Image: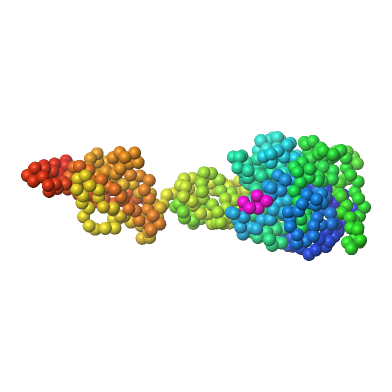
Amino acid sequence: MAVQFGRRLRRGATTTAVAAAAVAALSASQGPGSPLIASEDDQPAAGATPSDDNAASGNSPYFTDLPPLNTPDKPGTSVDLPVTGSAESGIPASILAAYKKTQQTVAGTDAACRLPWQLLAAIGKVESGQARGGRVDAQGTTLSPILGPVLNGQGFALIKDTDNGAYDGDSTHDRAVGPMQFIPSTWETWGQDGNGDGRKDPNNIHDAALAAGRYLCAGSGDLSLAADLDRAVLSYNHSDEYLRTVRSWFEYYKRGTHEVPDGSGVLPAGLGSGNDTGRDPAPGRTGTTPSPDPSPTPHGSATPKPPSKPSPGPSDPGGPADKPSYPPTPDPTPSQVLAGVRNAGTGALTATAGDAFAERIKVRARNGLGGPLAKVSVTFAVTGDTDAAFAGGKRTVILTTGADGTVTAPVLKAGEKTGEFAVRATATGTSLPAVSYPATVTARQADTIARTGTEKLTAETGAIFDDIAFEALYKKAAADGVAVTATMITDDEKPVENGKGPYFEGKDGKQVRTLTELSTDADGKLVLAKIHAGDTAGTYRLRLTAEGGATVVIELTVEAATDAGTGTDAGTGTGAGTETGSETGTGAGA
């Protein structure tokens, strides 16, 4: 949580300037790099309380020290350093593997995001001390739950229970969960199955790292650009101090890391002293608050020292009297308070399979007075059994409302799966009610279907008709992927399936006179092959019906086979065949 994290950071230093100086010293000592703060537009106003509306995590229950001023390795060398590297640069094996795998996975689906695994490592360090120094089992699940403080509004954000305690064990208020510290409601939207076990577990580092990666890449940003990276980090936890600390570890890890055994990672100072609510103190930690070091050695001295280590923040604002007090943050005015989001005039969402929805989903954020509220982070998520997705194949995107309080989702494209689903729009990271937009994908349609040839379709009894081709159109354009049904029908006023005459061969070799699961190709064409003439001469009817209602009926003529080698008997046979054909035609007419 932005507010609480900021207080913890300030508490350990003599002033906020000390922490800022430490960060500046770190940046300078490690060479030029990306700025440690985002662009001016992304920063909270001076003295204002940063909003938690767009945070993936509800808090940072661990306090992590800033990285040491000395680098783990010289610039330009391999990031896969031997185990002899500095202790601070060591990342537990399972944790490091999860970060690197996430980078590869996201690159395969969203290469434009350019997610670096070192950014995940930096966030993981700040959020949970790399899953408490790598205390995970062989599947990457934490050995004990990692739960943040109760988000009851007392020193932290107020987020009432959204999961009935399923993730955090608290059915009254929410608590951030797992090594990447996701709020339960955020996990419901962003949860991933990173290790392929069929579960989405926020306590599993593979699942949590992939969810964090997807979250950071939800926008259209390029994380190789400093400003876009800053925006992504601020969306995770909207705090300047948080951004600076994550940035510090990010730059530090980029200069070299090495793998250490699970459970042996370096833990933040003071871990287990109260911020790690509901958890056992980490091995080797007494739970006492370390005294802050003197002010850091100014940059340029012969032997630079690590910056001062702020002590962790309070676990309970109503605790011992010796805890420092802070002036209360003024309550925001109703015009600044997010009251909810609502539909901003979105019409019915209907599209044909494979097409883009013509209607764009639009949301308006409201303040406590009912007016528009700008700069509210809104998460749009495609839900339900569907392969529909936003542009770029994303099922979830995060955007920010403009000055008029509205934001419009990217173009939504239907997949091949027909049926109903929904798109949910929520104020990111809050438990405020979501807006649900029902959507329907209908099958591809044709308003015309016709045979492409004109020659008479004739075959002798016992033979096979030549291939018969058809073309389907929709609004005079080729209708691709349209479902078609072919049926041999009677010549009645209300035709039904004909039980005799030409037939198709089913998958089991049996005669069938109705074929389904046919569809037109990319050019709207369909070819019917292997229509058996049967053994009864006559004229028969074949009907094709395309999705959308277009139909065509064609005639198939079956002639008696001629056996030239049997003489008189052959003639008699032919006559019998002709007579039978005549009777069959009459019967069909009747």
Quarter of the image containing the C terminus?
top left
Q: Which residues are magenta?
A: 100-106
Residue at the spot x=32%, y=53% of the render?
A: 527
Picture layout, residue 268 above or below residue 166: below
Colouring: rainbow
In the rendering, at what x and y percent does residue 294 appear? 92, 52
Tell me if residue 3 can be seen: no
Q: Quadrant of residue 566?
A: top left
Tell me if residue 201 can be seen: yes
Q: With 275 as the anchor, is 293 left or right in this view?
A: right
In front: 280, or 536? 536
Q: Quadrant of residue 176?
A: top right
Residue at the spot x=82%, y=51% of the render?
A: 86
In the rendering, at what x and y percent does residue 69 appear? 84, 57
Q: How many marks are shown on the rendered structure?
A: 0
In front: 502, or 401? 502
* Farthest bottom residue in view: 32
Picture layout, residue 379 above or below residue 280: below
102 magenta-colored = yes
In the rendering, at what x and y percent does residue 312 appear? 84, 45
530 magenta-colored = no
Q: With 12 as the anchor, is 437 left or right in this view?
A: left
In front: 433, or 141? 141
Residue at the spot x=82%, y=38% of the render?
A: 283
Residue at the spot x=58%, y=55% of the render?
A: 409
